[in-house]
Image: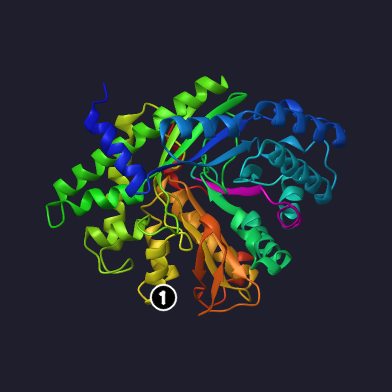
Amino acid sequence: MINIYEVEETNKMVEQENLDVRTITMGISLLDCIDSDLERCRDKIYQKITTAARDLVKTGEEIAREFGVPIINKRISVTPIALVGGAACRSPQDFSKIAATLDQAAQEVGVNFIGGYSAMVSKGMTAADEMLICSIPQALSETERVCSSVNVGSTRCGIDMDAVKLMGEVILETARRTAAQDSLGCAKLVVFCNAPDDNPFMAGAFHGVTEGDRVINVGVSGPGVVKTAIEKVRGESFETLCETIKKTAFKVTRVGQLVAKEASRRLKVPFGIVDLSLAPTPAVGDSVAEILCEIGLERVGAPGTTAALALLNDQVKKGGVMASSYVGGLSGAFIPVSEDQGMIDAVNAGALTLEKLEAMTCVCSVGLDMIAIPGDTKATTISGIIADEMAIGMVNQKTTAVRLIPVIGKGVGETVEFGGLLGYAPIMPVNPCDCSAFVNRKGRIPAPIHSFKN
């Protein structure tokens, strides 16, 4: 039973500490939309999405109003389009037509984003995979709501370096095609290792082939709540700090579980998972970096940052799994630079570098996220950064990702404004040393020895 104290406590979290349900994401399988005729395939996709998700936005708004918990985004994820469009598409331009259909369907049902313009190529690329990847710059420059992801590595399969090289070129071309919007297209594109099938967060959400026909996944975020809680134990022992974070994560996850179950009931769609991720926003007090500073750092990037982040990530997960039997997705702490004012301040102060961020990704939820880099960065350099991050995920059996934004026409010391939840970012310097000879090798990096656990 929930007592009156817990009700008041939750109300305070919402009103004063930026607690919100970041997203209700409906996953929709498009496997039954596969057709050898492109126009029939597009029509099936449009009809399936607009029918399955027609009440998603309305239901989310009703739950938010009735429960008093903000639900910021309503989103859709679909089966990786490289699988769905493979029978019908003969060129990258054909795949871009499917992207346009996804965008139209998303607009019709009123969701913020639709994810799943994706390919899974951790061991190799089919002709359809390669065509979809090559179509990404056009697709993201001509749509508003479509998000794209490509999984290029896994602990079981290794890293497809041909795909890594191609993604460096695709990211740069996407930046060029959206240069008028400060290369915003790259904010809707993420490269993964060990991508989960049930992630509700964009840009990396897709509906995995292991999922059912439809599912409801909810992403909860509460960095402001965690920061407020640990302010009360300032100077206390690590044991007290850990217990405080766990208890807070438990309460936040329960809110997500409540919303997810209610959305599932009203929409008559099975409940999938709650993703408890401390995903920051540009709002004051809604920062993962500020949590790390409250733990005891002058700024993010100071010695001890990686250890503090490891502690935070682990305790968030321990608290979350006690609150729901179905915690999944990514779950942990996100460290996107542009979306976190504390991260931005650390970069501007010279405390946080790209290399330190890479070290931090060894122990957090995702990876190098929403990082603006100079627009004249070479494609092979971008591929090298991706390869490093994929190696961290592969060896450590965890999800890692890269969302870099080479801002065309801008360089180190300048700032780029994305707006909304995407915030703004200082352009960070990139190591100038060349890695072209490494990136241009053909083939794949083999899986580590611990991949053979059977």
Q: Amino acid at mark 1?
A: Asn
User: Which of the 4 image quadrants contains residue 214?
Assistant: top right
How packed mark 1 is, by other alpha carbons closer than 10 Å (few <14, some 14-19, many 20 or more), is some
Q: Which quadrant of the figure contains the C terminus?
A: top left
Reply yes or no: does residue 182 show up in magenta: no
Query: Which x, y percent locates residue 167?
Result: 65, 58
**Start and end of the magenta stretch?**
138-154
User: Which of the 4 image quadrants contains residue 208?
Assistant: top right
Query: Which x, y percent locates residue 115?
Result: 62, 43
Reply yes or no: does residue 147 show up in magenta: yes
Query: Which x, y percent locates residue 177?
Result: 73, 64
Residue farthest to the left, as pictured: 236
Can residue 105 be seen here? The reply is yes
Question: Which residue does the image show at 59% across and 24% down from the upper left?
Answer: 212
User: For numbered disc 1, what is the local secondary structure?
Assistant: helix
> Height in image: 71 above or below 51?
below
Question: Which residue does the image show at 36% across and 28% down from the upper left?
Answer: 324
Residue under numbered circle 1: 348
Query: Which x, y percent locates residue 386?
Result: 55, 60
Can residue 352 be seen here? The reply is no
Question: Which residue does the image show at 57% across and 42% down from the upper left?
Answer: 205
Badge count: 1
Q: Which quadrant of the figure contains the N terminus?
A: top left
